[in-house]
Image (cartoon, rainbow, N blue to C red):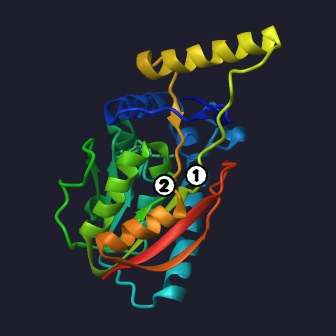
Amino acid sequence: METSARSWAVVVEMKLSQTRRHWDKMAETDPFWAVLTDPDKKGNRWQIDEFFADGKNTVEAELKGVRARYPGLRTGRALDFGCGVGRLTQALALHFERVTGVDISEKMLGLADRYNRHGDRVNYVHNSRPDLQLLAGDQFDFVYSLITLQHMEPVYARRYIAEFVRVAAPGGVILFQLPSQQPRENTLLTLWLPTLYKRLRRRLRRWLSVWFLFEPVMEMHALPRAEILALLDQAGAELLNAYRYDAAGSELESWGYLARKR
Ligand SMILES: C[S@@+](CC[C@H](N)C(=O)[O-])C[C@H]1O[C@@H](n2cnc3c(N)ncnc32)[C@H](O)[C@@H]1O
C-alpha cells in the first residue's frame, strides 16, 4: 500500500521494530524537521530556540483549552507519549511537577536528554513494546500525545490509547490527536506509460525504503472518530471534548480528543 499526503508521509504498514529503525534514522539525519515538518526547515534549518518556543506555545494554548473544559486538572505528573526530542515534554515541565517522556527511538531520546532544561523533574524512557507495561497504572494527572499515534499502524495506536487510560490517575486527563481519514491511495492504473513508470519506480523506492532503510519513511495512518470514542469509553474514560485539530503541515482532517479517566 502506498500513497502520500506529502511526499514524505506514506501509508505503509510497519512493525514497531521497523518504525523504530526509521525514527532512529530520522533522528540521525534531520531530527527537528522530522518532528515538525515545516518545508522551510528541512535540512536541519530549525533554530533550537524557535523549535522549543513552538512547543511552549502549543502546550500553553492546549492547557488553557483543557482548563476551560475541566478546571480540576491536577499538576502533579504528566506523560508525553512519542516525545521525540522533548519539544512538548520540556514545555510540560513548566506546568507539572514531574514529566515522563516516552519514545520508541533511542536516538530521539538521546537528543531529548541533551536539551533537557529541568534536571530530574523530567525523565525520558525508551519503549519499543506495543503497550506501556513499563509504566505503573493510575499515576498520571495528564497524558498527552501529539503527532505520534498517526505514525504507527492503527493496531498499535488502539492499544496505546487504552494504555493512556490505564496509566492515567483516576480523574486524570488524557489529550491526544489523530487524523480521522486515511490519506487517499494513489492508483497504479494509467494508460500513459511514462506516468506508469514513474508510479512503479516510486513504489519500488518506498518498498526498498521500508525494508532496507533506503531512506527513512514516515508512516501516516488514521482512525475513525467513532472508533476512538468507543475505545475511550471501553477503556474507562469519559469524553470531555472532540474537536478539529489539524496538525501543522498535514493535509488530513485531524481531531483532538480530550477525556477524563472515570
Ligand atoms: C512527529 S514526532 C512528534 C514528537 C512530539 N510528540 C512533538 O510533537 O514534538 C513523532 C515521534 O513519535 C515517536 N514514535 C513513533 N512510534 C512510536 C511508538 N510506537 N512509541 C513511542 N514513540 C513512537 C517517534 O520516534 C517520534 O519521536
Q: Is residue 218 visible?
A: yes
Q: Nearer the viewer, residue 15 or 233?
A: 233
Q: Nearer the viewer, residue 68 or 41?
A: 68
Q: Nearer the viewer, residue 245 or 84?
A: 245
Residue situated furthest right in the rendering: 192
Q: Nearer the viewer, residue 115 or 124?
A: 124
| Disc assigned to residue 129 | none
Given the image, on which type of amino acid does mark 2 rest? Arg
For the residues marked 1 and 2, what is the alpha-carbon distance in whole angstroms?
Answer: 7 Å
Are discs 1 and 2 less than 8 Å apart at CB? yes
Pointer 2: residues within 10 angstroms few (<14), some, or many (20+)? many
Q: Quadrant of the N terminus?
A: top right
The image shows residue 7 at horizontal and vertical percentages of 67, 31
Q: Determine which residue is flagged by label 1.
A: 51
Q: Residue at x 41, y 65 (%)?
A: 144
Q: Residue at x 55, y 21 (%)?
A: 206
The image shows residue 246 at horizontal and vertical percentages of 65, 59
Q: With respect to residue 205, does 169 lie above or below? A: below
Q: Determine which residue is flagged by label 2.
A: 87
Q: Residue at x 43, y 47 (%)?
A: 154
The image shows residue 105 at horizontal and vertical percentages of 35, 38
Residue situated furthest bottom in the rendering: 71
Q: How many marks?
A: 2
Q: With respect to residue 81, does 11 lie above or below? A: above
> In the image, is 173 to the left or to the right of 7?
left
Which of marks 2 and 1 precedes in the sequence?
1
Q: Identify the image quadrant of residue 14.
A: top left
Given the image, on which type of amino acid does mark 1 rest? Phe
Find numbered disc 1 in the image and state the secondary structure of the residue it sits on. helix
Pointer 1: residues within 10 angstroms few (<14), some, or many (20+)? some
Q: Is mark 2 within 8 Å of ligand 1?
A: yes
Q: Residue at x 68, y 21 (%)?
A: 188
